[in-house]
Amino acid sequence: MAEPGLSELITTTGRLRSKKLKDNVSDSHPILFAMDKYGGMQDATGGRTIVEEMSYGQNGTVQWYDGGTEFNMSSAPVLTSAEFNWKSLGGSFVITGKEKRMNSGPEQYIPLVSSRMKVLEDTMMNQLHSGLLGDGTSSSGQSVGGAALLVAKIPSTGVVGGIDRSTAAGTFYRNHKFATATDWTDGAINAGNVRRGYDKCINATTRGSDKPTVAVAGNDHWEYLMAALAAQQRLEDPAMAKAGFENIVYRGVPVVFGGGISFSGLSLVQNDLTYFFNTKYFKLVVHNAANFEMLEEVQSINQDLIARLMIWMGNCTLSNAKAQSVLFDS
């Protein structure tokens, strides 16, 4: 593909310029930041797969009794596991010996190697964030299985982590969903009913003090929430705000704006949708030896150039589906 402006070499070397690389590559990554901020990131050191152990049923032997009543001594399995495959993401860049030598000395306004490395990392971050929103089917199923799979609009179908949610045994592994077209008569979310819609989802996923740790709203839902709370004092999470993510705290749950610019053209959060995540149970597990790691440079045996590879390895996991919710209009 033809370069749209000045070449990479001219952009990074020589000529009087601002000496700062402008970012026209990275998208907004609110889910990645929110998961990191609210405990949704987990390191792993290895294993054939990623396994999440969980309880799934009541103990059926519990009973009221009087005196010498016999107890039910039948077997009562209550534990199971969900299993998730490792997913890998990677990219590369090359630099010729000529470029490396030209981009040195006092003429090196912007380091070419580190600049290409930064663009590679930003591009991979865009892909990872898109995967966090996806259902795991992109790239022929090689992508991570994200929110569209684990916090699904139709949670009574599909196999997640080896658990078939369409069966009676899999009902415990279905997330909460609220579709405005079918689950009430108030119509699509607007400024007049957005708080009630949010209340429905928060209430359905609260267990004592255990409730959603973060919500991520698409453009329309965010705008309606802002309008609904315009006349009230609005609180925000200062850490999210400091990182540049617009947010508001509603009923103790930070709500993050999930839209914005998409340089990559990859999907951001759907405009008429809000996810409510409890990051105690919705995790992004990352191998600690492949967390945007740069591999050693490789010198070509028959060319004057070197190549560098960057890799990431992990997947999304879910250990409590009923603690997650999705609110959507379409």
Image: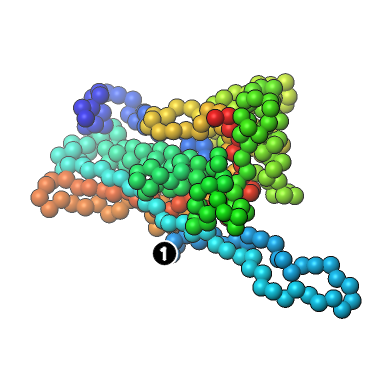
* x 13%, y 46%: residue: 304
**Residue 205 image-quadrant placement:** top right
Q: Position of residue 195 (x, y in %)?
A: 70, 29
Compared with 81, 308 (above or below) is above
Q: Position of residue 14 (x, y in %)?
A: 22, 28
Compared with 39, 71 (above or below) is below
For the C terminus, give its image quadrant. top right
Horizontal arrangement in the rendering, residue 144 relative to residue 154 (left or right): left
Q: Which of 66 and 151 is in front in this view?
A: 66
Q: Which of 324 and 88 is in front in this view?
A: 324
Q: What's the colour scheme?
A: rainbow
- Please tell me how many numbered marks the rendered image carries: 1
The reply to whether residue 140 is in sight is yes
The reply to whether residue 35 is in sight is no
**Residue, disc 1:** 48
For the N terminus, give its image quadrant. top left
Q: Which residue lies furthest to the right in this view?
A: 67
Horizontal arrangement in the rendering, residue 80 relative to residue 85 (left or right): right
* x 70%, y 46%: residue: 206
Q: Is mark 1 on a helix, strand or loop?
A: loop
**Residue 35 image-quadrant placement:** top right
Compared with 75, 90 (above or below) is above
Q: Nearer the viewer, residue 9 or 260?
A: 260
Q: Position of residue 288 (x, y in %)?
A: 43, 57
**Other residues around mark 1 within 10 Å, as few (<14) / some (14–19) / many (≥20):** few
Q: Which amino acid, mark 1? A: Arg
Q: Which residue lies furthest to the front in this view?
A: 167
* x 75%, y 73%: residue: 72
Q: Which residue lies furthest to the bottom in this view?
A: 68
* x 20%, y 47%: residue: 306
Q: Where is residue 138 in the image (x, y as percent from the top left)?
A: 38, 42
